[in-house]
Image (spheres, helix red, strand yellow):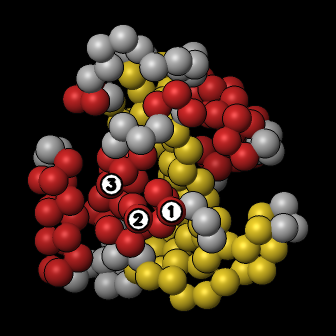
Amino acid sequence: MMMDEEPIGFDLRKVEYTNMLPEHIEDVRHMESLTFGEVWSRESYMRELTCGYGHYFVALYDGMVVGSAGGWLLYDEFEVTNVIVAPCMRYKGIGERMFWHMINFVVSEGCDLGNLEVRYDNEPAKTIYKKFGFKKIGVRKKYYDGVDDAWTMQVENMQQPAYLKRLETIAAELGMG
């Protein structure tokens, strides 16, 4: 079940970050519809979860889905396909922590290069991505709905000591281990 309103006494420390399972798909699709208007099909998510290169994660609070993130890890390169936080749970640190868990996982799997697209005016997301070392490398004109531009962003050298230190520093800032 996806959370539809912020719980009374919300405690960020109680959010659990784990692998997405088939039983999470409908809640993730609901978050997608509220966030983007469009949704991936259940079959698309099932393919992502079983193809061997799709890695998707959820954030759970009291067993309810409050966020999702994932992408494709091919050899040493990761392509972020989506990052979503339930509307009632935004601006609480869930997205940044979920992104850390995802990036930390792909780095542990040997990832050295990360790519993503982000809507040009999505300042909260761009702030998080920049914190993780992603830099703007280009623009995809009218990428979203044939209207809005996307920034393409990339981070390199994710296996180098400087990047691993960056992840440690972020984890410490977020109070994670």
Q: Which mark is residue 123?
A: 1
* Amino acid type for the residue under numbered disc 1: Glu
Q: Which residue is mark 2?
A: 127
- N-term mark: 2 or 3: 3
Few, some or many residues within 10 Å of mark 3 (<14, 14–19, 20+): many
Q: Are marks 3 and 1 in contact (CB under 8 Å)?
A: no
Give, as a three-letter code, the residue at label 3.
Trp
Amino acid residing under circle 2: Thr
Q: Name the element at disc 2.
A: helix
Which of labels 2 and 3 is toward the front? 2
List the residue tagged with mark 3. Answer: 100
Residue depicted at 42% across the width and 34% down the height: 59
| Number of residue marks | 3
Residue 167 image point, x, y percent: 22, 64
The answer to which of marks 3 and 1 sits earlier in the sequence is 3
Does residue 32 show up? yes
